[in-house]
C-alpha cells in the first residue's frame, strides 16, 4: 500500500535514503558527544578555577578604574553601586564569552582539558556562547548541577562540555 502511494504521488525515494543517512550520521554525532560529556566533579573544578580567575580580573579592573576615575567623579552612593555592578558583571560576561568564543574554553576548561560544543559536537556560534553566558547569570544555575549532569546554562543554550581530545 505504501509503495502504491509513493508511485501515485511520484515521490522520489532517493530523498528517503538521503534523509535516513543524515539521521544516522546525526545520531552517531550525538552519541559521540554524549560519551565524552564530563562529570559534575570536573565541572566543579572548572567553576573554582574560573571563579578565581574572574575575581583576579575584577581586582585588576577595579584597580585600573580607581586610577582612571577620581573619587570625586562618583558623587553619590547609587552611582557607585551601579558602576560596581557594571564592572563586576561586565568582567564576568567578558571573561566567559570572549574565552569561549575564541577558544571554546575558559582557563578552567584549559586546565581540565575540556571544551564547549553544541549538542551535535560542532563548535558553538558566537550567539550560542553569548546566550550561554547570559544563562550563567540565572541565580540558581550554579546549583543546577546537583540535580542534572549538565547545568541549566548548558540546557538552555543547547551546549555541552566534553573532553577535549584534540592535541
Image: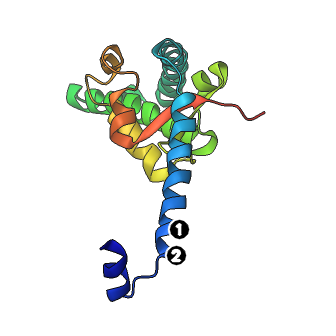
Q: Residue 88 carries which label?
A: none
> Within 10 Å of the Cα at label 1, are there few (<14), some (14-19), or many (20+) other Cα atoms?
few
From the viewer's perspective, tell me whether residue 93 is left or right of residue 82.
right
Q: Is mark 2 on a helix, strand or loop?
A: helix
Q: Is residue 42 above or below residue 15?
A: above
Name the residue at 55% across, 29% down.
35
In the picture, measured across the screen, residue 47 lies left or right of residue 155, that is right
Q: Which of 157 and 53 is in front in this view?
A: 157
Q: Distance between the residues labelled 1 and 2?
A: 6 Å
Q: Which of 127 and 156 is in front in this view?
A: 156
For the residues bearing labels 1 and 2, Cβ distance under 8 angstroms? yes
Residue at x 55% of width, y 16% of height: 49
Q: In which quarter of the image is the N terminus?
A: bottom left
The residue tagged 2 is 14
Q: Is mark 1 on a helix, strand or loop?
A: helix
- Establish if 27 lies above or below 136: below
Identify the residue under disc 1: 18
Q: What is the crowding at mark 2: few (fewer than 14 residues within 10 Å), some, or many (at least 20)? A: few
x and y percentages locating residue 144 in the rendered image: 31, 20
Q: Where is residue 113 in the image (x, y as percent from the top left)?
A: 66, 24
| Residue 98, percent from left and from top | 54, 41
Residue under the image location 43 percent in, 30 percent down: 70
Amino acid at each position: 500500500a505504501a509503495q502504491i502511494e509513493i508511485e501515485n504521488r511520484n515521490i522520489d525515494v532517493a530523498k528517503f535514503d538521503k534523509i535516513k543517512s543524515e539521521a544516522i550520521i546525526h545520531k552517531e554525532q550525538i552519541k559521540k558527544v554524549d560519551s565524552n560529556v564530563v562529570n559534575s566533579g570536573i565541572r566543579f573544578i572548572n567553576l573554582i578555577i574560573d571563579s578565581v580567575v574572574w575575581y583576579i580580573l575584577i581586582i585588576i579592573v577595579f584597580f585600573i578604574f580607581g586610577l582612571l576615575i577620581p573619587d570625586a567623579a562618583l558623587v553619590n552612593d547609587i552611582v557607585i553601586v551601579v558602576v560596581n555592578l557594571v564592572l563586576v558583571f561586565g568582567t564576568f560576561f567578558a571573561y566567559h564569552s570572549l574565552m569561549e568564543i575564541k577558544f571554546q574554553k575558559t582557563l578552567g576548561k584549559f586546565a581540565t582539558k575540556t571544551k564547549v560544543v553544541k549538542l551535535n559536537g560542532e563548535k558553538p556560534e558566537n550567539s550560542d556562547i553569548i546566550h550561554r553566558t547570559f544563562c550563567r547569570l540565572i541565580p540558581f544555575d550554579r546549583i543546577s548541577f546537583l540535580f542534572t549532569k549538565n547545568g541549566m546554562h548548558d540546557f538552555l543554550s543547547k551546549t555541552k562540555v566534553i573532553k577535549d581530545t584534540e592535541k
